[in-house]
Image (tube, grey):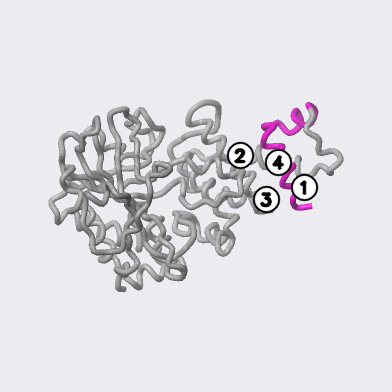
Amino acid sequence: MNKIAILESIRWRALVAEAKDYIEKVFLGGFRSRGFTILDEAPSYPSTDPTVYFVGAQINQWKEKLDDLGYFANPQNCIRLQNMHLFYTDEAMRFCSCFRTEGAIAPADYFQQMLDAAITFLKEIGVAEERICIKANRYLMELFESDREILLETETASYYRWTYGEEDLSGLGLTLAIRNKDTGEPYDIGNVIQISRNNYPIAVEWGFGLETLLTAILSEDCPIHFADLPTEALSLGDGNDKAYKMLDAILTLRHFAAYKITPGKGGVNEMADSYCCGFAYQALVVNKLSYSEAISLAIDVLKEAGNHYPILDRISFYLGRINYLLSLPPESDLDDKKLLKAVKLDRNLISRIRHEKQRTL
């Protein structure tokens, strides 16, 4: 099967894993041919970087190597938890909490070559040249040359600026994007970043998420379509963007279970607890699943991960409490001390559930 057919076929989820493997092999092969060292991926957790709980990008294992000015590339499974705040809002989810990245790093004078390598890679996997564009500000345009369309952006909202959890490290990066086949709107897929220590350029980085890249290539709206989830679970997201956050939560919890992280108080355990609650809220309140449907979905996704019973128990707790609150008649649904004691949920969560109940009446 040729590369275009592989990418197109994943619309029916027939070859998601094969498409990811193909893209990864092309990426790593391209940088190996350029003389880059291919590094082994690090565990997503525990992280060797004290500034983060999880590896959120390849840069986590590169920080100690930056001043060596070497040439590295590697794949990496990542976990980022910025989606947590979206579980209780109407804001759309554009990026997965758990994803696989591909990245490369080189000395600071490699900026132009890194951009060229990135564009060559995109064309090699079958992205039409006219769909590839660059977002850059005026300063960044001085670092490279390109004959393709450049979307000039302003310096608002620190769009191009990056931090790495260390005071002396900073980054300034352009964005590569792929235009939607139907609307022509650019979908951001990754960045080529100039990294500086104490404002002195020391390295250049290029990286992207596999799921995000596939989303852009196929003009989808959310990377969850290409996440590592059972087909039955993914089918919930077909034409139903309400399911994205629910699926993102349970996928993340599967990674927590695999790393033997249990729900609890403080630090990463509290994050696990928050994702349990977020999944229950999304399942019952937003997606209108029954208790049995929600717990069956959780079991189906978590069953292959070790140590998943504590997470299932906590999900069951939140499902039961939220179900109880949803079952109360409107005249009894009062935010008083008795209700707080009965449902054992956060006051703000109770308010959100009550608000959703009113909105659907």
Give the answer, above or below, for where 171 lies relative to 119.
Answer: above
| Separation (CA) of disc 3 from disc 2 | 16 Å
Disc 1 crowd rating (10 Å Cα; few below 14, some 14-19, many 20+) is few
Q: Evaluate if marks 1 and 4 touch, with contact meaning CB atoms under 8 Å apart.
A: no
Q: Evaluate if marks 2 and 4 touch, with contact meaning CB atoms under 8 Å apart.
A: no
- Residue range in magenta is 337-361
Front tag of 4 and 3: 4
| Separation (CA) of disc 2 from disc 1 | 21 Å
Q: How many marks?
A: 4
Residue 358 shows which numbered tag? Answer: 1
| Main SS of residues in magenta | helix
Front tag of 1 and 4: 1
Residue 310 shows which numbered tag? Answer: none
Q: Is residue 140 left or right of residue 89?
A: left
Of mark 3 and mark 2, the one earlier in the sequence is 2
Q: Evaluate if marks 4 and 3 touch, with contact meaning CB atoms under 8 Å apart.
A: no
The residue that label 4 is drawn on is 322
| Separation (CA) of disc 1 from disc 4 | 15 Å
Residue 277 shows which numbered tag? Answer: 2
Front tag of 3 and 1: 1
The residue that label 3 is drawn on is 292
Of mark 2 and mark 4, the one earlier in the sequence is 2
For the N terminus, give its image quadrant.
bottom left
